[in-house]
Image (cartoon, helix red, strand yellow):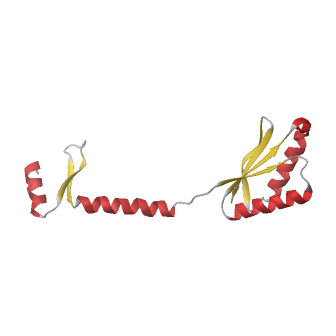
Amino acid sequence: MTIDEALAAAENFNLDLVEISPNGKPPVCKIMDYGRFKYEQTKKQHEAKKKQSSFQLKEIKVRPKTGEHDLQTKMGHIRKFIDRKDKVKVTVIFRGREITLSQKGRELLSRIAQEFEEIAVVEQYPKFEGRTMMMVLAPK
């Protein structure tokens, strides 16, 4: 169909002639209500955005000499964050001469990972960065 015939047909139906594939041989056009098409497209994008799952990255900081009760409290916070489908970054901070206790920090992180192995997976295994050691837990 020629361009003039297509434009006449679109005008006949009070619709628009929209070019779908300009690089095709021959180019492909469609007769449609372009305003309605754009409206439906934005509606679909809005719906897709609604269904998208979102999470936050929460951070819990501990020290290698953190007491048992304080550690249990922080584990309670971690459990609450994971139940809300948030990721948790557990950071062990070493100050001054505590840097020599790096093995104790690694044991602390492995203990936390074992505590939450039923409800969370270790997304990023413990690694050292300067005077901090960190690990990321994600909900299963």
**Quick one: 116 or 96, which is closer to the camera?**
96
> Residue at coordinates 33% horizontally, 63% vertically from top-left?
40
Left-right relation of 77 to 27? right
Left-right relation of 27 to 96? left
The image position of residue 10, as x and y in percent, is 13, 59
> Residue at coordinates 70% horizontally, 65% vertically from top-left?
83
Residue 118 in view in this figure? no
The image position of residue 93, as x and y in percent, is 82, 43
Taking 39 as reference, is 104 above or below it?
A: above
Image quarter in which the C terminus is found: bottom right
Query: Residue furthest toward the front?
Result: 96
> Residue at coordinates 18% horizontally, 57% vertically from top-left?
16
**Quick one: 81 or 111, which is closer to the camera?**
81
Quadrant assignment, res 15: bottom left
**Quick one: 117 or 94, which is closer to the camera?**
94
The image position of residue 29, as x and y in percent, is 20, 52
> Residue at coordinates 24% horizontally, 58% vertically from top-left?
34
Left-right relation of 36 to 26? right
The image position of residue 117, as x and y in percent, is 78, 58
Quadrant assignment, res 82: bottom right
Quadrant assignment, res 92: top right
Number of marks: 0
Residue 78 in view in this figure? yes
Taking 125 as reference, is 33 above or below it?
A: below
